[in-house]
Image: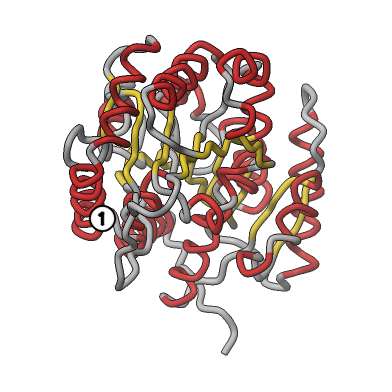
Amino acid sequence: MILADELFASRERAMLSRLEVGMADEGVRVIHAIPERAAGRVDARGPEIFSQAITYSDVAMPFADRFRAASLARSLEELVTDENPVDVIHVFGGGVWNLGIQLGKLTEAGVVLEVWRSGLAARASSTREKHGPPIVFLAPDPSIERLLLAEGPGVTVRLAPWGVHVGSQSREILLENRTPSVMVIGTGRDPRPYAAALEGIAQAVNSGLDCMIFMDALAAHRARVWPLAQRLGLLSRLSLIEELEGRRDLVLLGDVLVQPDSSGEQRSILLDAMASGMIVVAASDASVSALIDGRTARLVQGSDAPSWGQGICGVLSDRARSREIGRSARKFVKDHRLASGQVRAILDAYQWLTSSDAIPLRQPPG
């Protein structure tokens, strides 16, 4: 079972769908558990629908996880008639770690906790329970693996870097006869980097570099972007898109992907953008090893508007260099961050976890 919180069920559904397909190719059956609030949005998104999904209550209250886990266990029993309906529960999202552990107790399944951001690593040593299910912490980046290993010898860690698909043809970006499109992603919880990035874009526009800007609506609301965009004269160029990061069909048509946040979070959209040949402009983040200045991205070292202005202006003015970095990033993903590698690493972790209790991974019927 893949147990995802609302953020992952919407923002990372493309990756979760890739994992399902990859595991199915290896003979492993996958069931998705997603929150009720996200179920309608996920079901309406066309080709990335999960083949088998059950929902759980969005209510997150003290002691509610035991009841939510019991409800999930009953749903599993109705869907799968085996004595033990699941072997492994893979949890995406720190908010549902305890729910996954409670469900592991009820189903006697091993639990894999995806440590998708560096801030979750500190919870690892306190998450283990004496009478709970066996737990493996999965690190999607070597930097997070190091943080987890530092938590002590009792924390079981496996490395499984996130990966994406790379198409056979690379798309040409920043064409001379077309207005460049800049996609701005992130959470917007810290308004300061968003303001600096937007002011940097304004500096580029004021210097004569044309572009259209697309930004996640929720992030823009959190960062209070609209009044700033009005003051900077960017409203005619700015479009707000609901759940932009989950809209890979739209994002990957852009030329430039901008990530102002530097919060130690892994985001598969960065890898998807690199694989498509886009040029990534991002805040420097030591927790994201795929961001390599001049090779996979143009990194902005400072958090102020002049630093962002220099980065954005450099990308839009030197289009040949930007295309070169885009091609280099695509090669990096092809060499080091393919989805098939992620699936293999995850299945190795599953096999290690289940074999320690002598529980075989079952094949789907037929």
Residue 50 x, y percent position in the rendering: 64, 65
Q: Is residue 185 left or right of residue 210?
A: right
Q: Which residue is found at the position 33% from the left and 52% from the top?
A: 176
Q: Quadrant of the N terminus?
A: bottom right
Q: Residue at x 43, y 31 (%)?
A: 259
Reply above or below: 185 against 248: above
Residue 366 in the image, given as x and y percentages of width and height: 57, 90
* Residue 102 appearing in the image: no
Residue at image coords 52%, 31%: 186
Residue 20 higher or lower than 276, as above or below? below
Q: Identify the secondary structure beneath mark 1.
A: helix
The x and y percentages for residue 18 are 48, 63
Which amino acid type is shown beneath numbered disc 1?
Answer: Arg
Q: Nearer the viewer, residue 37 or 115?
A: 37
Q: Is residue 148 above or below residue 227?
A: below
For the point 56% across and 16% down, the residue is: 232
Question: Is residue 138 toward the left or the right of residue 75 in the image?
Answer: left
Please say whether residue 168 is visible from this viewpoint.
yes
Q: Which residue is farthest bottom? A: 366
- Indicate the quadrant where residue 175 lies: bottom left
Picture quadrant where residue 6 is located: top right
Label 1: how many residues lie within 10 Å, few (<14), some (14-19) or many (20+)? many
- Nearer to the camera, 264 or 60: 264
Instruction: Pick the residue in front: 146 or 358.
Output: 146
Q: What coloring was used for the rendering?
A: secondary structure
The residue that mark 1 highlights is 330
The answer to whether residue 66 is above or below residue 21 is above
